[in-house]
Image (cartoon, rainbow, N blue to C red):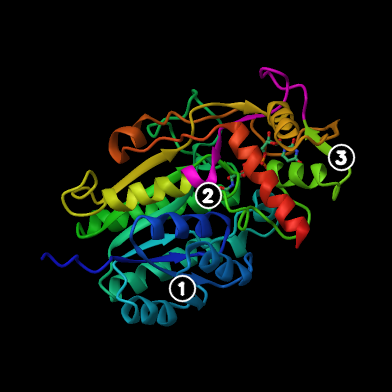
Amino acid sequence: MSIAPPPKTVLLTGGLGYIGSHTALALHEAGWRVVLLDNLANASRAVLGRLEAITGAPFPFYEADVRDRAAVEAVLKGEGVQAVVHFAGAKAVGESSADPLSYFDNNVGGAVALLQAMAAANVRQFVFSSSATVYGTPKYLPYDEAHPTAAINPYGRTKLHIEEILQDLAASDDRWRIAALRYFNPVGAHDSGLIGDDPNGIPNNLMPYVMRVAAGQLEVLSVFGTDYDTKDGTGVRDYIHVVDLAEGHVAALEALQPGRALGESPFEVVNLGSGVGHSVLELVKAFERASNRPVPWKAAPRRAGDLPEYFAEPSKAKALLKWEAKRSLEAMCASSWAFQSRQAEG
Ligand code: WQD
């Protein structure tokens, strides 16, 4: 009788956050042993109990900051970690312009400290949460991975700097296996309705704001610009269901294993997007259908730093990772509404 090998252990930094928690579920379901680390700056410890309620399994959790090299190295060694998915970091574009030093310290400093701890613990499989923001103003659309990069705000610059650090690291030591995943606009929630996008305070992003307007917690949605040169004058984005995104991380981690698609390449960047652009008003209408609630909106001035339109060319992920986004805008809205309703029940 063949004895199954022990499950591989992966550490998720920022593992109690919106995308981290969904990825923890997807990796668990794919047979990985998942260890979580989070400094709780933008996540609630309550998410840990929800993950365990959904899976029936405990998740080892460490409250720590990735900039604490000694603490991270101890977790890597103590838990027998073989790979790391790095979500931890600050992600508000406007805030990054107001306080760039904290973004470079947290995001870039945190990534360097984490990678140093990994090297010290002889852990060199790394999936990085990057962003389509690194493409800057489109030279052409859809963005493919060959599109020039040019960050247009400190947040995007931190993502770009970390990608450049990863490229130099991989070039210096070919034992590294690194995938930088460039996200488009993650929205939606796990089917359980127990976890989802639940930012503190007034949401910056469209979907969590729409959720709260539909729930009556916020009065009206301000549509930032209705005079763009787009299908209906409002901003167009490539929305991707967070569960699709989570499954994309599983596919990337599997691809980094010896003998698999990325098993021989020290560094790759891959778009994780649907390849379809939807406008603000298309999302609002889809949400009204999904929730059967009105989402009142009003035209407002354009938001500084916003691009009119961008969306992904997703074929590299399909070819390399055997992954593509499957879930519709309607499913993104329905799952967001189910999560919002569950939250309102308390
Ligand atoms: C989407 C559209 C707004 C709020 C940001 C980050 C990006 C990534 C995803 C981390 C735009 C419009 C929004 C509102 C509105 N995050 N909007 N009223 O700006 O595309 O991307 O989040 O990786 O890096 O930049 O997302 O949801 O803020 O905006 O009209 O109250 O909705 O103008 O057209 P964005 P968003």
Residue at 58 percent of width and 41 percent of height: 152
Q: Amino acid at mark 3?
A: Val
Q: Which residue is mark 2?
A: 157
Q: Position of residue 50 (x, y in %)?
A: 58, 65
Q: Amino acid at mark 1?
A: Pro
Residue 70 against residue 46 in the figure, above or below = below
- Whichever of labels 3 and 1 marks the residue nearer the N terminus, that label is 1
Camera-near label (3 vs 1) is 1
Camera-near label (3 vs 2) is 3
Crowding near the residue tagged with mark 2, few <14, some 14–19, many ≥20 C-alpha atoms within 10 Å: many
Q: Position of residue 30 (x, y in %)?
A: 35, 55
Q: Position of residue 329 (x, y in %)?
A: 60, 32
Residue 135 against residue 199 in the figure, above or below = above
Residue 18 occupies quadrant: bottom right
Residue 158 against residue 44 in the figure, above or below = above
Q: Helix, strand or loop at disc 2?
A: helix
In this view, the residue farthest toward the left is 1
Residue 195 occupies quadrant: bottom right
**What is the tally of numbered marks visible in this picture?**
3
Residue 106 against residue 290 in the figure, above or below = below
User: Mark 2 and mark 3 in contact (Cβ < 8 Å)?
Assistant: no
Residue at 29 percent of width and 70 percent of height: 119
C-alpha gap between disc 3 and disc 1: 40 Å
Q: Which residues are magenta?
A: 225-244
Q: Which residue is mark 3?
A: 220
User: Mark 1 and mark 3 in contact (Cβ < 8 Å)?
Assistant: no
